[in-house]
Image (tube, rainbow, N blue to C red):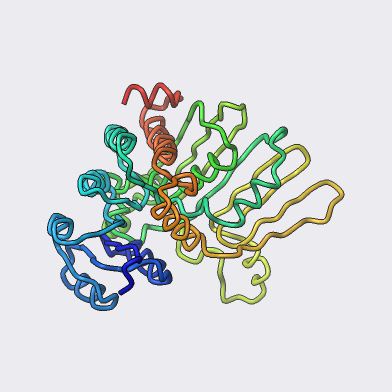
């Protein structure tokens, strides 16, 4: 094993953890040293596959291993406690979103990160998408007016995410990606948030038996401090593969539609982003320009992480904790608005929670 490889440990090897291992294994700069999970059977299988040492206890792994970086992909309520523990051992961290289900933990981790020289980055991998960077170049920032998007989904594939008390709802766990991209594209912070959620559409006996205990559909509107307006709407009420069909007569329509979409509106210009597929730029009297995705964003995210760890330069990251926590605050403010029925002023929400 080359001594100049970065030694990685992976905490949690569920659906997201496995994807992180898949990406990390592509890089010669990374040595997958250790894996931690409470599921003994899964831990045995995955650690054997990646030839890594297996731990059921995070404390044991941190005590026995000499790691450089840990990747945290556990259920959301564990994120901040585990990150704080890893920071005590002087480790750099890539942590899955969402950060936490409450602002107290978000701000506690921020306090520790700001007082440390460690790198903590959040898994908002779509900021690294070539499409998003091309969109940012194409936008007329002087006339940017509106940014809207939707995320259509079904009952979450991971059981704990289907429960509001564990996953926080779709705006916290999944559609937060769109909120984060909107912050990144607009380049300004959100001033105020208003949200309406409903359980209608996933509140049947069948849904309860399936383990679903959450809001079904969500609408969040917000105003940025530069007067751009935005909206994200999402749902868990649909079914897998909603835009695919065996009926060849609608195949053309199906291929044009996406379950995740974002529109950016400037003066006489529309940019339509189909998540993970392409983006099209529409202008008056100009042929539409189609942009194709060049590389899986997670690969670019890991490349940036490796560079940041080696150079100690956080500026190569688009998702450093010092910025990413602000996206988390918007999602939690949306939940607060939905629960109270009131407009939430974001700066006040952050200060008071």
Is the residue 293 above or below the residue 353 in the image?
below
Q: Residue at x 26, y 73 (%)?
A: 46
Q: Residue at x 69, y 43 (%)?
A: 139
Relative placement, left or right, of 66 versus 276 is left
The quadrant in which residue 43 appears is bottom left
Residue farthest to the right, as pictured: 285
Quadrant occupied by the C terminus: top left
Quadrant occupied by the N terminus: bottom left
Tell me residue 222's x, y (percent): 53, 32
Tell me residue 119's x, y (percent): 36, 46
Q: Residue at x 38, y 25 (%)?
A: 349
Relative placement, left or right, of 101 versus 139 is left
Total count of labels: 0
The quadrant in which residue 171 appears is top left
Relative placement, left or right, of 113 versus 129 is left
Residue farthest to the front, as pictured: 3
Viewer-closest of 191 and 210: 191
Viewer-closest of 195 and 297: 297
Q: Is residue 323 in view?
A: yes
Relative placement, left or right, of 262 versus 166 is right
Is the residue 16 above or below the residue 235 in the image?
below
Is the residue 47 above or below the residue 225 in the image?
below
Tell me residue 84's x, y (percent): 23, 43
Q: Is residue 205 in view?
A: no
Viewer-closest of 250 and 310: 310
Tell me residue 169's x, y (percent): 36, 45
């Amino acid at each position: 094993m080359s001594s100049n490889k970065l030694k990685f440990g992976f905490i949690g090897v569920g659906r997201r953890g496995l994807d992180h291992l898949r990406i990390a294994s592509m890089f010669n700069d990374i040595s997958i040293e250790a894996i931690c999970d409470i599921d003994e059977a899964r831990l045995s299988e995955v650690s054997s596959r990646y030839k890594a040492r297996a731990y059921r206890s995070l404390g044991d792994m941190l005590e026995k291993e000499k790691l450089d970086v840990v990747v945290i992909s556990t259920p959301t309520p564990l994120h901040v406690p585990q990150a704080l523990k890893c920071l005590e051992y002087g480790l750099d961290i890539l942590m899955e979103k969402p950060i936490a289900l409450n602002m107290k933990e978000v701000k506690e981790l921020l306090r520790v990160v700001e007082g440390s020289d460690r790198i903590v980055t959040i898994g908002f991998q779509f900021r690294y998408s070539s499409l998003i960077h091309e969109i940012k170049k194409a936008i007329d920032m002087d006339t940017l007016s509106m940014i809207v998007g939707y995320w259509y989904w079904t009952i979450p594939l991971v059981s704990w995410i289907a429960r509001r008390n564990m996953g926080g709802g779709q705006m916290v766990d999944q559609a937060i990606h769109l909120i984060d991209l909107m912050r990144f594209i607009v380049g300004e912070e959100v001033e105020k948030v208003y949200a309406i959620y409903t359980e209608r559409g996933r509140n049947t006996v069948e849904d309860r038996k399936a383990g679903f205990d959450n809001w079904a559909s969500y609408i969040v509107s917000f105003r940025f401090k530069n007067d751009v307006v935005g909206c994200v709407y999402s749902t868990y009420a649909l079914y897998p593969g909603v835009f695919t069909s065996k009926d060849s007569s609608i195949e053309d329509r199906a291929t044009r539609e996406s379950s995740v979409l974002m529109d950016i509106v400037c003066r006489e210009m529309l940019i339509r982003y189909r998540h993970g597929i392409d983006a099209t730029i529409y202008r008056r009297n100009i042929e539409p320009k189609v942009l194709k995705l060049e590389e899986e964003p997670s690969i670019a995210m890991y490349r940036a992480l490796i560079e940041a760890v080696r150079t100690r330069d956080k500026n190569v990251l688009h998702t450093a904790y010092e910025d990413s926590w602000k996206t988390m605050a918007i999602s939690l403010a949306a939940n607060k608005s939905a629960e109270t029925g009131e407009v939430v002023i974001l700066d006040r929400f952050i200060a008071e929670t």
